[in-house]
Image (cartoon, helix red, strand yellow):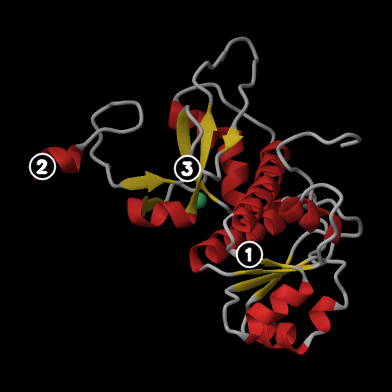
Amino acid sequence: MAVAEAIGRDDLGRRSPTKGMRSCAGCGARVPLGRARRELVRLVVPLAVPGRGGDVPPVLVDLAGRAVGRGVWVHAAAACVDAAAVKGIARSLHAPVRMAPAELRAAFGAAAGRRVAALLGAAARSGQLAVGATASLKACSRGHARLLIAAHDAAAAVQAAEVRAAAERGLVVRWACKGELGAAVRGAGAQVGLVAVLSVPLAEALRAAIALFETFARAGGAAPGPPAVCTAITHGEGRPGR
Ligand SMILES: [Zn+2]
């Protein structure tokens, strides 16, 4: 029934006249559901919210879209994230959920780093990734590379003619260092300077996650460009010394 569907219900089961739309908890802009997955990031407040006497419930940055809890949406832009941290999440959820903007930005950066590593790991396991310079260049020359990801410290690999040609077409992004890239695709201790992503959906997901990482992981005003120290961080399981 079209009218009932149009009214629908929101995440809390309330009747909502805005089903089919998501609002950014930062700037308040409404985004049609079909575009929300691409344009907005879901933040989740776990269901057991203490919400008492200054307790600050943790807010999860749910890039994989699977976390359970009360969700709000926000543009992946610093101004929207800051506004959401200060009052947008609290206003959207009618709950005393507040974070320091720097804290929420850092959570975005960490979540983006984990997401990149998880996507790379999944791509490697499912055969949708060419790993290493030789395999990546072969994928390039066969026209199979949808995206090249080069470690920031992979100086030689990015000089290859195939990589330079791909860069001119906007198909090369830099992420992490060889140790981090290697850990994501081959396991701890591996060094990998270059990978080629062979599927379009994975390439798009990785490009988005890396852009998010670049936006937020160096929050605090670091200049864009390669990190001084490799800190791409964060592969779910804690590692010694991290
Ligand atoms: Zn916004």
- As helix, strand or loop, the secondary structure at mark 3 comes to strand
- As helix, strand or loop, the secondary structure at mark 1 comes to strand
Relative to residue 187, is residue 170 drawn left or right?
A: left
Q: Which of marks 3 and 2 is nearer the N terminus?
A: 2
**Residue at 60%, 60% in the rendered image:** 206
Q: Nearer the viewer, residue 202 or 36?
A: 202
- As helix, strand or loop, the secondary structure at mark 2 comes to helix
The number of discs equals 3
Q: Where is residue 153 in the image (x, y as percent from the top left)?
A: 87, 67
Marks 2,1: beta carbons within 8 A: no
Q: Which of marks 2 and 1 is nearer the N terminus?
A: 2
Rounded to the nearest angstrom, the CA distance separating label 2 from label 1 is 46 Å
Residue 3 — which label? 2
Marks 3,1: beta carbons within 8 A: no
Q: Please, what is the three-letter code of the amino acid marked with disc 3? A: Trp
Q: Please, what is the three-letter code of the amino acid marked with disc 2? A: Val
* Figure quadrant of the C terminus: top right
**Residue at 35%, 31% in the rendered image:** 11
Q: Is residue 55 above or below residue 150?
A: above
Q: Which of 35 and 118 is in front in this view?
A: 118
Please name which of the two marks, 3 or 1, marks the residue nearer to the observer. 1
| Residue labelled with disc 1 | 129
Rounded to the nearest angstrom, the CA distance separating label 3 from label 1 is 31 Å
| Residue labelled with disc 3 | 73
Relative to residue 203, is residue 132 drawn left or right?
A: right
Q: Position of residue 222 (x, y in %)?
A: 83, 57
Q: In this view, does 186 lie above or below 50?
A: below
